Amino acid sequence: MDRIVFVSNDGNIFSVAADGTDGRNLTNDGNGWAISSLRRPKGQPEPVFYSWPTASLDGSSLAASKVTLQSPTDIKAELHTFDLKSGLTKKIHENPSGDAPFVAAGVPHYMCWSPDSKSLAFVGQDELRGLTLHVSNIKNEPPKEIISGSPIFSLWSGNSNRMLLHVGETMYLADIAAGKEPKELRHRSIAFRCFAWALNGTKSVYVARAPYRGGSAIYLADENGDNGQPVAPIRRGETVLVSSPSQEYVAFTEKGPPAAQYYVTLKLLKVNDIEVKTFVDEPLLAFFWAPDGEKIAFIGYDPSTQKATWKIIDVKNEKVFKLTDFVPSSELSTVIAFFDQYAQSHSPWSSNSRYLAFTGHAESRKYGSNGKHGNNHVYVIDIHSRLSPYSVGAGSMATWVKT
């Protein structure tokens, strides 16, 4: 059964079974500082804490940021990898020190393992180039710089050889295995963030300006990002794309009113038939495919009360059922804001598609004893029983590790 890895309130990385038992510390040098508070009280030792643990798909490795507050204007942000079998750790990157060495608020690095678990793509700060995407393999080779710019969104190919990149408004194909410079693609767009793959990686999917009646459209292109053709119109605003695990479907959202921070529909594009069907017609913040492709977890949203609610779509039966209301932690709020990117690295689903893990506040059947008590807890919901979520410990930013 998968385990849950999270940052406990003492700043260390903690691992626990899905039922909250068998707690283990993976680090011990954190000293009780949360990433959301970078102030150092007088007389206290310099704060050290970990953040954003990111597991490889095969469960063999973990990557995480390690932050040391040397002074209010001298913050050190390192990226470490952990071999979960041998226990060996390695520093692979360090952002330039300063008062703002993070890639975003509360995010020292963004990390995403390749599907074969042999390479780690990460975005860090570079002293000269700013935000920079690197790729590091598990060998003792230094990370390679791939591209710089802002913002950077990326998607690995299924064979781990290539990446589709969206940097600013420019799209690229990067051949990681060949070590070539990223190739710029024809279209430019700010109407989406991450690409999607379809039909076993033989097609790439993105959003760009439509050639008819203005507005945008979903484009279906070849595996190299070329020869894109519009296949479905987008009514308004930014669109988010995430393909199903089988890549038979691409789920996509449409934005709400101007300046709204939520979406108003969730639709499925069946790629073979170019058929679009609406599954959710209500405000939502994010969605995540289950690994079995039979369910989608989405976060419903009530704009009048600002209440967030976990809900499940049964894709085959086209039914929706509610799980629980909750308030996300600040880290989970970041995941929600960029869920198409984080779905690749921090899915809330366990690998057997039975459990969801999330952090923040929720009505709970019990509170776990792992970690120090704090404002945020790590919760698990059993999708089969649909009982209230239960806490497995106090902490933030949870992710699953396959065992």
Image (cartoon, rainbow, N blue to C red):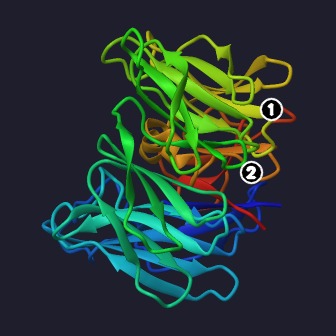
Query: Which label lies toward us, 1 or 2?
Result: 2
Q: Which mark is residue 350?
A: 2
Identify the secondary structure beneath mark 1.
loop
For the point 74% across and 30% down, which residue is it? 272
For the point 49% across and 69% down, which residue is it? 176
**Residue sitting nearer the eye, 318 or 365:** 318
- Marks counted in the figure total 2
Crowding at dot 1, Cα within 10 Å, few <14 / some 14-19 / many 20+, comes out as few
Q: Quadrant of residue 245?
A: top right
**Image coordinates for residue 231, horizontal then vertical, percent:** 57, 23
Residue 331 visible within the image: yes
**17 displayed left or right of 197:** right
Say what amino acid the circle numbered 2 marks: Ser
Residue 12 visible within the image: no
Which quadrant: the N terminus?
bottom right
**Residue sitting nearer the eye, 186 or 70:** 186
Q: Quadrant of residue 366?
A: top right
User: Is 311 placed above or below 34 here?
Assistant: above
Say what amino acid the circle numbered 1 marks: Leu
**Image coordinates for residue 123, horizontal then vertical, percent:** 37, 62
**Image coordinates for residue 118, horizontal then vertical, percent:** 61, 75
Identify the secondary structure beneath mark 2.
loop
